[in-house]
Image: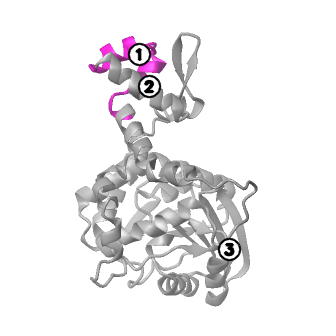
Amino acid sequence: MNKKTSSKVDTVRLQNMSRAFIGSASLFAAIDLELFTCVAEGDNTVGKFAVRAGITEVNADRLMTMCAASGLLHWHSDHFENEEDVQRFLVKGEKSYAAAWLTFTRPAWDNWGKLTEKLANPEPATVIGSYETMTVEAARRYHEATASVGFGSGRRFAKQVDLSSATKMMDLGGGSGAYSIVAAQHYPGLKAVVFDLPPVVEITKEFIAKHRVEEQVSTQAGDFTRDDFPADCDMAIMASNLPQYNSQIIGQVIAKVFAALLPGGEMHLIGEMLDDDRAGPLDAAIWGLYETMSNSTGMTHTRADCVAYFRQAGFTNIQIHEFIPGILVRVCGKK
């Protein structure tokens, strides 16, 4: 047990955790009522916001007070103003508007209230859980909601990794194809294959067409835990789906990548990884627990675990890089 710096032990931290759902509910309500857009456009007092949102002044005051106490708004003399991140990501019309991304887990709200039951579920877990029954429409909702973040990560990858000598890249579980599409835009000589489940690649094709990279980016429908990989690749990426699989599956997939890559090829694994002391970060733990909801065999993996998967597969020059600090880590190796 960690030693306390103070002799006083109270329930404040635990109370805050037990009521955290109220903060989520407040954020969702503020997004629904376009509070932050109203503030940005000058309807930044209780009275003005109440009129525009069609709610009573009492309720407007309650919500704005909660958002201010949560660090989303601040009071400036005689009106509210958005905090910097709120202004950037939660004001409609801004290029970086990310409400869809920040609320895409909202449909799971009721399920998370049944976490105890989910943890005690006697039904055997499957490799990919509820993803086995994913429909095209479900895939479209998910990837449209997360596209802004996915393409942001794709741009980050293209800046961090030199792909100038790569000729063909396999993108495992590539979803919208964001990484492949951005890579193709940066490197006109690069070909890429997005490998994902059949319903998902139908949506991938839509994103590929939208960005007009059909000559460079193609799709392959299948389950990469079981099916053969694209041939003649000298680059492989697997991004943001690490916790969906257990250590045995991840080890097997990375070994399959090594076998499929051309000599001198590279693999980049980008995912939510625990620190080696397993004390965090929280995001990795959340996504590991999320697999309880889909009844998959997925789990969290530490950085050391991922390095070990690469080493056991035969990769050399294995490196660990911060991709998005506190959120995503990139492990890479050469064949």
Q: Is residue 82 above or below residue 178?
A: above
Quarter of the image where the C terminus is located: bottom right
The prevailing secondary structure element of the residues shown in magenta is helix
Mark 3 or 1: the one toward you: 1
- What residue did someone put label 1 on? 46
Q: Secondary structure at mark 1?
A: helix
Please name whichever residue, 56 or 179, is drawn nearer the observer in this view of the structure. 56
Magenta run includes residue 108: no
10 Å crowding of disc 2: few (<14), some (14-19), many (20+): many
- The residue sitting at 31% across, 21% down in the picture is 53
Image: magenta residue range: 31-55
State the image quarter where residue 62 is shown. Answer: top left
Residues tagged 2 and 1 counted as in contact (Cβ below 8 A) = yes
Q: Secondary structure at mark 2?
A: helix
The answer to whether one can see residue 5 in this image is yes
The answer to whether one can see residue 172 in this image is no
- What residue did someone put label 3 on? 276
- The residue sitting at 45% across, 77% down in the picture is 245
* Amino acid marked by disc 3: Asp
Q: Is residue 275 above or below residue 88?
A: below
- Residue 333 coordinates in the image, percent (x, y): 68, 76
- What residue did someone put label 2 on? 64
| First in sequence: mark 3 vs mark 2 | 2
Q: Distance from label 2 to label 1 (Cα)?
A: 7 Å
Left or right: 45 as drawn, with respect to 234: left
Please name whichever residue, 309 or 208, is drawn nearer the observer in this view of the structure. 309
Mark 3 or 2: the one toward you: 2
- The residue sitting at 30% across, 85% down in the picture is 124
Residues tagged 3 and 1 counted as in contact (Cβ below 8 A) = no
Q: Distance from label 3 to label 2 (Cα)?
A: 40 Å
| First in sequence: mark 3 vs mark 1 | 1
- Residue 232 coordinates in the image, percent (x, y): 53, 78
